Structures are given as C-alpha cells and as structure tokens.
Amino acid sequence: MLRDSPRSRTVLALLVAAAVVLLVLDARPGGNPVTSVARAGGELVFAPAAAGVGWAGAPAVTLYDGLREGPRAAARVAELEEANAALESELQAVRIDENRADQLDELLHLSGLGGYEVVAAQAVTRSTARGYAHTVTIDTGTESGVREDMTVVNGSGLVGRVIEAGPRTATVMLATDVKSAVGARLEATRKIGVVNGGSVPGGPEADLTLELFDMEAPVESGDRVVTLGSHEGAPFVPGVPIGTVDEVQVAPGALSRIARITPAVDFASLDVVGVVVAGPDGDPRDSVLPPKPEKPAKPKEEQ
C-alpha cells in the first residue's frame, strides 16, 4: 500500500500523465509504434491473468446458470414425463383394442362355424351371485335380446349360461361353477355324458369333470368334448367345444367313467364373449372344433 508522501504523489502524477499521453496517441489514426508496444505489453501481462480468472470463475457461472434455469428445466422434465405417460397409456389402449378385435374375430368365426346368432359383450367383472361360486357380469342385457338360460361362448368355446338378465347387464354362471352341469358328448365315439364344474366325488381335482354314462365307453387323454345340446337350445346349443380329456379314472363302485377335462376357454382372462340369442337350424356336430394338430411322424427305425 502506497503511503501519502511527496514521492508517492509525484509517482502517481507521472503515471496519470503517461496514461493520458498513451490514450491521446492511441486515438490518433494510423499505427503508432509507442502505443503498439504498450498495448502488446499490456496484453502479455493481463491475458494470462484474465484467462485464469475466467477458468476459476467458470464453475460459479455454470452453477449460476443452473440455478437460473433450474425451475424451467424441472418444468420441462415434468412436461416430458407427462407426455410419455400419456403416450404409454395410448399405446396400452391400442394393444387392448387390438386384442379385443382379435377376440371378436375369433368369436365371429366360431359362431359362423356353428350357425349361432350371437350378441357380443364384454365380461366386465367377476362376481358372486345367488350363492354361485363362479359368475361374471357382462355389459349387455334384455335390451339387446339377452334372456336367462342362453348359452355364452367366446372364440375358444363354452363360457357358461345366463342366469340373470337386466336391461343392460346380465350375470353368467361359468361352466366351472360347482352347480354347473352341461350335457356333453365325445368327438370321436359320440358317447354322451355330463360335464360338471369342479371335481366330483371320487374324481380327480379338476376345473371340469366329465362323467360318461357308459362304463365301457372308450376314452383316452386327448379326446375332445362338445356340448350335446338342450331342448330348443336352452340353456345350451349343440356343438360348442367344452374341453379336452386330460386324465381318465374309474372309481370303485362308480356307475360311470370319470375324466378330468382341460377347458377350451381360459376362464382367468375372459374379456370378449357372445350370448347365443338364436341357435343353429341343425346340430353342427364337430364342425366347430378346430383342426387337430398333426402327430409327428415316427422315425423310420420305429416303423
């Protein structure tokens, strides 16, 4: 720190005078060797210092800019996240619509093969109605021609029957309910019996159980079962796939043969269904069943 003395005042006066001279000379047009040398010296001295100050202050500038842009950036991120969520929701809705369209196509294909007139509906909720264990509510009712004791199917086969109908909704008892009993027959032998929901006394644990009335009826794993059909098609129209024989069992003292059935319908994922409001003119027999998969050819050494 300079002390206030005659010498310091003299030095300060000389520096101010030199600065004024340099400014006057630098303002004159054309190059000036004196000011050029002075300017070059100043740049040589001050440029590294300015660069150092800029390098040291860069983090602070970045932090300041981040703090200033922070609210706007957060709002932009939130906006993008909201847009992404909306897009994902739209894509999910498209997938659901495509899946339902596929199910509707399968339903119409089955109804066409069997000659069934159906009213399409959606299985809205699973419910427990009037003491039944397995029921669903569908979003169509009497206003669309739905009545009690009508067959309900989907694109794979038998779902159940209508047990209650209101103006815009109806309750369907699934074929897997323990109170459900469906007249049935085997595809190949045409032997008849009844398919019950759940297990029967003396039978294996099952979602569906077939009881054949003929103890000598040939039946084996892989045999397919369809509805026999009720009088005037109520509650069951004929020819609807019920399922496939999985295991055959003969209970001691039983009056019928018992077989566990794998359902044709996936009851855990019901969505699009159809209520058969008018049955076929005749028995479609086995025409509604899908083609059987071809058995793999045996190796030549086994033939």
Image: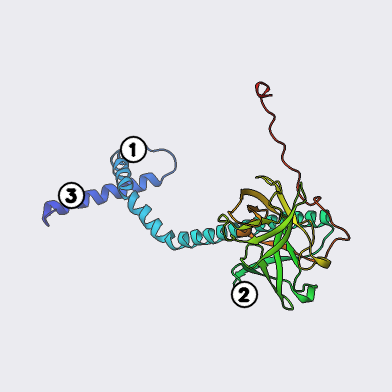
Q: In the image, what residue type sits under mark 3?
A: Val
Q: Are marks 2 and 1 in contact (CB under 8 Å)?
A: no
Q: Between 142 and 150, which is closer to the camera in this rendering?
A: 150
Q: Which numbered disc covers residue 40?
A: 1
Q: In the image, what residue type sits under mark 2?
A: Ala
First of labels 3, 1 by sequence position: 3
Query: What SS does tag 1 mark?
Result: helix
The image shows residue 15 at horizontal and vertical percentages of 23, 49
Does residue 291 sit above or below 71 in this rendering? above
Mark 3 — residue?
Answer: 11
Query: What SS does tag 2 mark?
Result: loop
Q: Between 92 and 17, which is closer to the camera in this rendering?
A: 92
How far is the residue under mark 2 from the one under mark 1? 98 Å
Which numbered mark, 2 or 1, is in the foreground of this view? 2
Circle 1 Cα neighbour tier, 10 Å, few/some/many (<14 / 14–19 / ≥20)? few
- Toward which corner of the image does residue 238 lie, by quadrant? bottom right
First of labels 2, 1 by sequence position: 1
How far is the residue under mark 3 from the one under mark 2? 108 Å
First of labels 3, 2 by sequence position: 3
How far is the residue under mark 3 from the one under mark 1? 23 Å
Q: Are marks 3 and 2 in contact (CB under 8 Å)?
A: no
Q: Between 85 and 289, which is closer to the camera in this rendering?
A: 289
Colouring rule applied to residues: rainbow
Rendered residue at 77%/76% (across/down): 142
The image shows residue 181 at horizontal and vertical percentages of 68, 64
Q: How many marks?
A: 3
Circle 3 Cα neighbour tier, 10 Å, few/some/many (<14 / 14–19 / ≥20)? few
Q: In the image, what residue type sits under mark 1?
A: Ala
Mark 2 — residue?
Answer: 129
Left/right placement of residue 238 relative to residue 216 reads: right
Q: Which numbered disc covers residue 144?
A: none
